[in-house]
């Protein structure tokens, strides 16, 4: 790999941005595209597909055979609430290759005994997220039922363009949440992207089933997320 290409790839990975290296096999030329930057018409489809799937491989573009190397940031889940649902989610997330962090200021719930081997932070989300941050490769799952704990990270996730924002609660609870989010300046369009009730509708009732519904919805959102920068 050329040193300039390597620098671009490393820079993108440090910033948790997706990047695709396109090599024209006949000409031997190489182009690097970071997600969010314009892509020429002839490469738009193949680069978009590579970013969507995360898979490298051969493709045809404008009559030429090209090889695409794609590097996606590791997707992660930030769960707000050390509850039974997140205990089950902690078992499912690694199976789907998602990193998981759980944040909950309630030290009676956020104990190492209940979440052995999990990245668990017993602190307020606003104090944790100012250092850790959220991004487009993060899913935010809010399941405490407590606005004092859930509202800040939900608003932060919407502003950070997380690919998934889900919140537990009834439709009545969510209606009240919408009013509070509007009061802190979020638009109707931003708020409409929240998945509430959280999880795919599979008739889930137990914490384990709800965690499965959430995990399935996160995978769906990740694989179908819009890819930016696909216009020349």
Image (cartoon, rainbow, N blue to C red):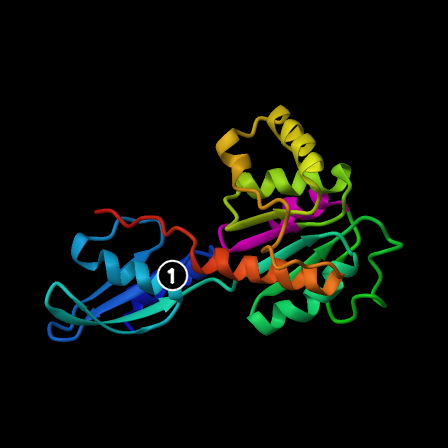
In the image, is residue 133 part of the stretch drawn in magenta?
A: yes
Work out which residue is located at the far right of the displayed protein and give it: 108
| Of the pair 143 and 200, the residue shown nearer to us | 200
Locate residue 140 relative to residue 52 in the image: left or right.
right
Q: At 73% across and 60% down in the image, what residue appears? A: 86
Rendered view: 165 above or below 147: below
* Marker count (numbered): 1
Work out which residue is located at the far top of the displayed protein and give it: 183
Circle 1 SS class? helix
Query: Which class describes the residues within 10 Å of circle 1: few (<14), some (14-19), or many (20+)?
Result: some
Quadrant containing the N terminus in the rendered view: bottom left
| Of the pair 41 and 130, the residue shown nearer to us | 41
Magenta-drawn segment: 124-141
Q: In the rendered image, is residue 116 in sight?
A: yes
Q: Which residue is mark 1?
A: 52
Query: For residue 186, which quarter of the picture?
Result: top right
Q: In the rendered image, is residue 134 in sight?
A: no
Q: At 11% across and 75% down in the image, what residue appears? A: 26
Q: At 70% across and 41% down in the image, what residue appears? A: 170
| Of the pair 188 and 16, the residue shown nearer to us | 188
Residue 232 in the image: x percent, y percent? 21, 47
Locate residue 232 relative to residue 124 in the image: left or right.
left
Rendered view: 141 above or below 194: below
Rendered view: 140 above or below 45: above
Rendered view: 75 above or below 123: below
Query: For residue 146, which quarter of the picture?
Result: top right
| Of the pair 7 and 121, the residue shown nearer to us | 121
Residue 214 in the image: x percent, y percent? 62, 58
Residue 224 in the image: x percent, y percent? 42, 56
């Amino acid at each position: 790999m050329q040193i300039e290409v390597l620098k671009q790839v490393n820079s993108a990975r440090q910033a948790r941005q997706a990047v695709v290296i396109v090599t024209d096999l006949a000409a031997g030329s190489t182009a690097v595209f970071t997600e969010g930057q314009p892509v020429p018409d002839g490469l738009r489809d193949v680069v978009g597909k590579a970013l969507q799937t995360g898979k490298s491989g051969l493709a045809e573009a404008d009559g030429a055979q090209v090889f695409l190397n794609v590097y996606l940031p590791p997707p992660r889940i930030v769960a707000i609430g050390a509850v039974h649902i997140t205990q089950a989610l902690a078992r499912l997330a690694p199976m789907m290759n998602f990193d998981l962090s759980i944040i909950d200021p309630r030290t009676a719930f956020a104990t190492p005994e209940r979440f052995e081997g999990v990245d668990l932070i017993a602190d307020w989300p606003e104090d944790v997220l100012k250092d850790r941050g959220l991004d487009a490769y993060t899913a935010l799952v809010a399941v405490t039922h407590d606005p004092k704990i859930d509202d800040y990270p939900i608003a932060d996730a919407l502003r950070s363009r997380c690919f998934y924002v889900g919140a537990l609660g009834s439709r009545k609870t969510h209606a009240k949440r919408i009013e509070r989010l509007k009061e802190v300046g979020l638009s109707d369009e931003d708020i409409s992207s929240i998945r509430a009730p959280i999880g795919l509708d599979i008739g889930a009732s137990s914490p384990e089933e709800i965690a499965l519904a959430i995990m399935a919805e996160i995978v769906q959102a990740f694989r179908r997320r819009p890819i930016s920068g696909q216009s020349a």
